[in-house]
Amino acid sequence: MTSPKQVSDDIRFMGRAIALAKARMGQTWPNPAVGCVIARDGELVAEAATAPGGRPHAEEQAVPAAGERARGAVAYVTMEPCGARSSGRTSCSHFLIDAGVARVVIAAVDPSPFASGRGMERLEKAGLQVETGLLAQEAAVLYEGYLHRVETGRPMVRISGDGDGFDARFAASPKADLATELKRLGEAGYTRLWVAPGELADALRDQGLLTA
């Protein structure tokens, strides 16, 4: 049975991981912003977030920073660690396994072909305890654009005054084929775009391409 202190620690450390990831939103495309916190005996050991440009991933920074203190520790990750890498490099799940982490707590499952349960499966096969869904609602804002791109092939577009936390501004003629333009940007790795209020935003809304 989980103790009240463990529950409190889990919420605290996952909250910290989410905060780390939020601070990197708009800087990590084509990869989502992920936060990773490694803790042991209720004390923070190491922390990291996806680097600008999408690499290195959060886990591959936090694990070396933790060193031997990662052995038997708990890793709090805002998104499922990848089970494979498009680059062929060591996956984040392998980083955690090789470090001797005992338990991995995950906020959101990654639907990409390089994770989609494969990361969790690798962790569990290696004997690590895996839990999902902690603070999932709080982490949702981190991945809504990423999930939108996975599902539609297009980045999410929202109205914003300054574009803070977005990958880039969507600049197109309101008369252009907006769906095609967004598909092109989705293929380039963009997940969250912004537009200012105006004619372009109205055209996107009329075509069902603007996220409320």
Image: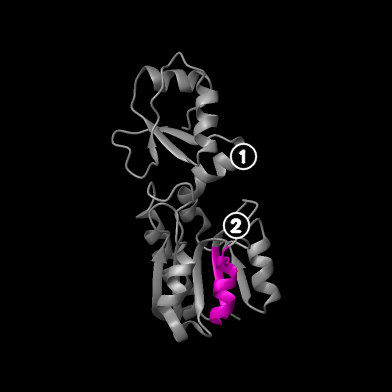
Q: Which residue is mark 2?
A: 109
Residue 156 location (% of width, % of height) = 49, 36
Q: Which mark is residue 151?
A: 1
Mark 1 or mark 2, earlier in chain? 2
The residue at 64%/66% (across/down) is 120
Residue 44 location (% of width, % of height) = 39, 78
Q: Secondary structure at mark 2?
A: loop
Identify whether 130 is placed above or below 84.
Answer: below
Q: Secondary structure at mark 1?
A: helix
The residue segment tinted magenta is 89-106
Identify whether 97 is placed above or below 86.
Answer: below
Comparing 118 with 2, the one in front is: 118
Which residue is at the far front?
A: 88
Q: CA distance from mark 1 to mark 2?
A: 14 Å
Residue 126 location (% of width, % of height) = 67, 77
Residue 48 placement, left or right of 179 = left
Q: Amino acid at mark 2?
A: Val
Is residue 8 among what the camera can see? no
The residue at 33%/38% (across/down) is 163
Classify 10 Å Cα crowding around label 2: few (below 14), some (14-19), many (20 and above): many
